[in-house]
Amino acid sequence: KESSGINAEWPLRPGGKRQCVLISGESGAGKTETTKLVLQHVLRVSKHRRSWLLDTISQVNPILEAFGNAKTVMNDNSSRFGKYQEVHMDRNGIINGVSISHYMLERSRIVKRNDGDRNFHVFYYMFGGCKNLPRYLLLSYKNHRYLHHDIYQETDSYIASDHTKSCFEELSMAMLDIGFSASEIETTWKVLASILHIGDIKFTFDEDTDTCGIITPTVLSTVCSLLKVDQVQLSNSLTSLLTTTRGENIRKMYTLRKCEATRDGLAKTLYGRLFDWIIDKINILSNEATTKRDTVSLDILDIFGFENFEHNSFEQLCINIANEQLQYFFNQHVFTWEQSEYEREGITTEKVSFENNEQILDLLLTRPTGLLHLLDEESRLARATDTTLLHKLKVTWQNHAHLKFSPRADNFTITHYAGNVTYECQGMLERNRDNLSKDVIGCLSGSCDPHVTEVFCGVVSSTGTMKYSTSGFAKGTLSRKKTQKRKPSFNMTLSRPGRVSVPKTKKPVSGNNRRKKEPTSVAMFFRNSLKEMMTKILEAEPQFIRCIKPNQHKDPAKFDRSVVIKQLKYTGVLETTRIRQTGYSNRLTYDDFVRKFQVLSKERTTANTKKEKSTDCDSALIPLLTVFLALL
């Protein structure tokens, strides 16, 4: 794993090429740990002129894991978001900072999870290590609906363990070391506590007045106290919507189902925006201001792995589409481009066949009949149901080779590159909708807590994440020895185009190019996130790391041959080995070769034309071969 870090980091200095390390594999295969190893290696071999900055960067991971990772049945520390880290260096190999872009946080995990899964780690860290729980009116995790899905005996042991306590202490120390102020950290715990209390708000429907009301006023009061918002305003925004028609204000009352959906939507949005706010602050505090434009970056992509649970829904569909897209890029880079390069240079090699998954991406992402676009269409219809969604899919794609429907069940099966996955339609429309009312957002934006207001003061980007003003963060947030004002100084735009354009299946509607404003949805944000992520990857020189899971039971020191062989086959690793054997795995340009080996040649010339560069290569190659043959 560390050798991959060396391969990616070393070309930054002599060649000045932007590198991207793509870490992929099934859920639980070790991608997150590999990411940490690669980053640790890069920090270790870099020049330590700014030791405080390197210390800051090393403290980022405990925060990201606490807020973005969770236990699943396949992985005890599963990343529930996509993480794209850019380590910025100058031409001397000195690290200037790190920027983190995140995609597709699984916010729905806050309110609902599969059996055997847990919520995000940070909630359990609080119960295991926070000494101020009574201040937030938190007594036991069992008292809160959003943690009811847990297996109590297992969770009790986890919370009581020394590991969980130390994780909370490490998280708190990391936030302080990076530069979060004490008041910001306190607000973070209050927001997390308020999310748990929001899940305990209950409603009742009054048939006489045809309205809904809150029957847990004490819980509502607790939420308002933690967030410092007006109780009447929050109550109204959870049970009704205020609209203006011809200058007249009209309050439309919600149904019981709508009230519950709004409550859960508030909890998901609150956690998602807290996560955005934390990462934005990390980006500001872990970058040093510099006037140098001559910088390069080493990018590391760590994204959730391919998933196939007993029950799969909308979240697994998005996760597997992202992995499908990365597999397509791998196929293009390793097979299509490689063999085209051999043909262009007149090299005779054996044609290597591989599984092309472009048809699957057409099925999932093409516009306007792709599965995600059909899901968005149904989500915008007031009377649409999961059944009408399934019917629309059947009418549109009934004869597709990679999509099968069960005659008696409300589900469908997609043949992915990694195998068949059956998805349940139940709840898909609701999970895709992102329609938290402006009344709720306005209520939280008016909080008397300046940090809560700050969390909601950003602008929603085309990927669904919040973008904040750096000037608002710079005030009083640096509690470090280095107190100079720092702000993100890396807004790199590379002119080098990707070798292959993203095919028609990967051209989601950009937020800036829509002819008319469409209702936002989780699927729309996901498509835009995927497009942005692939654009960054195409602008860099990729290095691939395949993580292979040794067995399906999370057992240490157990190697299941059939499990490993299956992964090697569907990821194309075996075919990659064949094409490397028949071709040339390491190809340097004339300039790179001369720069590396001209020291062996007696001649010192500066070549301009291709012919002159070829001559320089020959003059450097002859003594190199002489030395090599002498060693045989």
Image: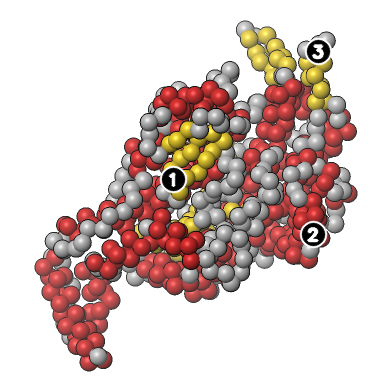
Task: Read off the residue under disc 2.
Answer: 157
In the image, 143 versus 306, the foreground residue is 306
Of the image marks 2 and 3, the number of the one nearer the N terminus:
2
Are dots 3 and 1 in contact, CB under 8 Å? no
Tell me which amino acid carries mark 1.
His
Kindly report the distance in space between the C-alpha atoms of the residues bearing marks 3 and 1. 48 Å
Asked which quadrant contains residue 625, the reply is bottom left
Horizontal and vertical percent position of residue 475: 66, 49
Of the image marks 1 and 2, the number of the one nearer the N terminus:
2
Task: Read off the residue under disc 1.
Answer: 416
Placement of the C terminus among the 4 image quadrants: bottom left
Of helix, strand and loop, which one carries label 3? loop
Tell me which amino acid carries mark 2.
Ser
In the image, 279 versus 327, the foreground residue is 327
- In the picture as drawn, the residue positioned furthest to the left comes out as 611
> Nearer the observer, disc 3 or disc 1?
1
Residue at left offset 70%, top offset 15%: 252
